[in-house]
Image (cartoon, rainbow, N blue to C red):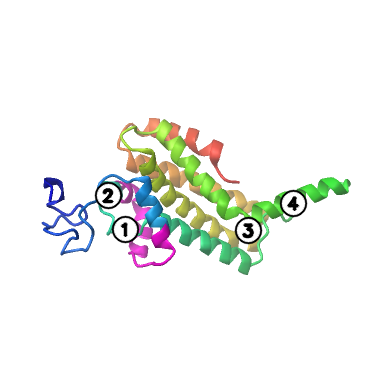
Amino acid sequence: MTSESKYCRNCGAQVTNKYCENCGQRTSVYKVSFKETINDFIDAAFSLNAPLFITLKQLVVNPGIVLREYLEGKRKKYYKPVAFFILTTVAYLVIRSAIGFDPFTDTVVQVENTQNNQLLTKARDFMLFNINKLLFIFVFTLALFSKLFFSKRYTLAEYLAISFYLTGIYTLFTTLNLFLVVWVSKEMQLLGIFVMLVYFIYAMTSFIKTNKIVIIIKSLIVFFPISPM
């Protein structure tokens, strides 16, 4: 065993095997990699055995701690980012279907040309039936932009893990906002995006401990071009 694996990166206990005797996390935990992210995706399809509520609470209250500790090796302590993203996406789809929400209702401009109406209808149906794929695109785009504009000390794979967490929170905000849109006003659709912008700025300023003004400006630059509408 190498010197780097003598202490568990999750709980700090001394270890002598491949897994920590105290918390159960494997000792060979280093930087977040694409391989680990794919394994998380496969694992998420078969198990939901991580501290979801602790992760959710910490992501809302102090996301910077969650992001830093997860990247530093405390993987057992938190719900895995890909599983968190999938769970919030499924919750959104189920609730949207249950309340019969159509984001294009009363927002599509009616035109006399039947062909144009058909194109708008096809575009709407594509958005509705492929929202999960579009969210995956948003995750990868957010990770790429974050890598370009924020700290270079983190790899693209690490920013991808961060993006899965943050997009999961965005999806959760959007899900809760559905009730306001349906029961209060269609104009409330923009509220979810505004709340996510505020949260994204808060998350990045608490995660990257540098000049907050610079981080806020970079957050605006990253968020607006890729924000899902």
Q: Three-letter amino acid code at disc 4?
A: Lys
Which residue in the protein does label 2 denote? Answer: 69
Tally the marks: 4
The answer for how far apart the CA atoms under marks 4 and 3 are is 23 Å
Dot 3 falls on a residue whose secondary structure is helix
Residue 60 in view, yes or no: no
Disc nearer the start of the sequence (2/3): 2
For marks 4 and 2, give the one nearer the viewer.
4
Q: Three-letter amino acid code at disc 2?
A: Glu
Q: Which of the 4 image quarters holds residue 181?
A: bottom right
Q: Which mark is residue 122?
A: 4
Disc nearer the start of the sequence (1/3): 1
Dot 4 falls on a residue whose secondary structure is helix
Between residues 206 and 146, which one lies in front from this camera angle?
146
Q: Residues within 10 Å of mark 4 (few under 14, many from 20)?
A: few
Q: Which residues are magenta?
A: 42-68
In contact (CB < 8 Å): disc 1 and disc 4: no
User: What is the x, y in percent for residue 91?
Assistant: 52, 64
In contact (CB < 8 Å): disc 4 and disc 2: no
User: What is the x, y in percent for residue 202?
Assistant: 40, 44
Disc nearer the start of the sequence (1/4): 1
In contact (CB < 8 Å): disc 2 and disc 3: no
Seen at 20% across and 54% down, the residue is 27
Q: Which mark is residue 181?
A: 3
Which residue in the protein does label 1 denote? Answer: 78
User: What is the x, y in percent for residue 129?
Assistant: 64, 57
The answer for how far apart the CA atoms under marks 1 and 4 are is 40 Å
User: What is the x, y in percent for residue 28?
Assistant: 22, 52
In contact (CB < 8 Å): disc 1 and disc 2: yes
